Image (cartoon, helix red, strand yellow):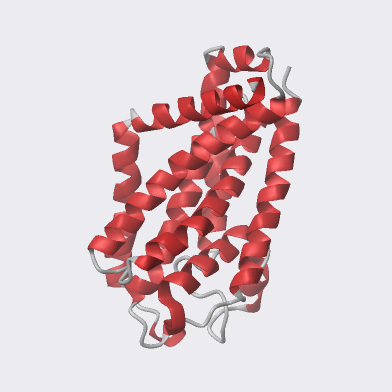
Amino acid sequence: MTEIRGLFTLWLREVKRYLRDRLRIVSGIVSPVLWLFIFGTGIRFAGAIGSLNYQHYLFPGIVGQTLLFTSMFIGISVIWDREFGFMKEILVAPISKVSIFFGKMLGDSTDALIQGIIILLLGTVLGILEDPVMFFQLLPVMVLMTFGFVSLGLTIASFIQNLESYGVVVSFVNLPLFFLSGALFPVRGEYVPEWLQTVSAFNPLTYGVDALRQIALGQEWQPLFPLYYDLMIVVLFDIAMIIIGTLALSRRK
């Protein structure tokens, strides 16, 4: 019971801290909206996506971007906790470091998921996500994506000592993951150079975005991989990052 209580307390703390930061929630909405309406309206990839509406193509990628950026930047909470001494108190608490990591990971994942749900609701209201049933079909994929990327952010934060360095490193990681995932343009086909196709195959976000796009677009889009394959890669990524993240947190004294 002590482990469960400690895990729940850490989860609740992360969620409350996120919900109280209204500015962060609002700013997390503005960026995806700008991408969706300005980038989505101004650019067309007619040769790559055929007659498909580009905003409809772009929407799952923007959801993936929201989950990625929110998940990774939330990892900064580890550095804040270390700066103010809260991390030291957690580490000496009578619960395992596995529970500590899972408490923070689940809390931060909930925060990122809330941000993604806001974008989904916005897409539903604006008619971009035409079938409301898809809203519930997309949620499990989004949950799996947040687990992996939150764990990655927490892992990076465990090795970095100050806020400035964390921002630089996360931006360095986020941008290649985002641009090489197929979120903005297809990463397969005759229009795509071979090197880009190869690099995208090693990008975990590629599989998450592909799964989101399969569900959101249905028969309108030819997926890169079968849905079960996308989900398998995302789950394997989650497991790997959770193990690495737990080990990274365990090294802290």
Is residue 59 shown to the viewer in this render? Answer: no
Q: How many numbered marks are there?
A: 0
Q: Is residue 170 left or right of residue 119?
A: right
**Residue 169 falls in which quadrant of the image?**
top right
Eyeballing the image, is 46 above or below 151?
Answer: below
The vertical placement of 116 against 220, above or below, is above
Q: Measured from the top left, where is residue 141 in percent x and y?
A: 53, 59
Point 51% across, 37% down: residue: 108
Residue 91 higher or lower than 182, as above or below: above
Q: Can residue 215 be seen by looking at this rendering?
A: yes
The residue positioned farthest toward the left in the image shown: 126
The percent coordinates of residue 214 (x first, y second) are: 49, 73
> What is the quadrant of residue 65 in the picture?
bottom left
Say if 238 sits above or below 86 in the image: below
- Residue at (68% x, 20% y) in the render: 95
Which quadrant is the N terminus positioned in? top right
Between 41 and 141, which is closer to the camera in this rendering? 141
* Horizontal arrangement in the rendering, residue 78 relative to residue 132 (left or right): right
x 57%, y 31%: residue? 104
Out of 19 and 2, give the one closest to the viewer. Answer: 2
x, y (%) of residue 23? Answer: 30, 34
Q: Residue at x 71, y 34 (%)?
A: 246
**Can you say which quadrant of the picture contains the C terminus?**
top right
* Residue 33 screen position, x and y as percent: 29, 56
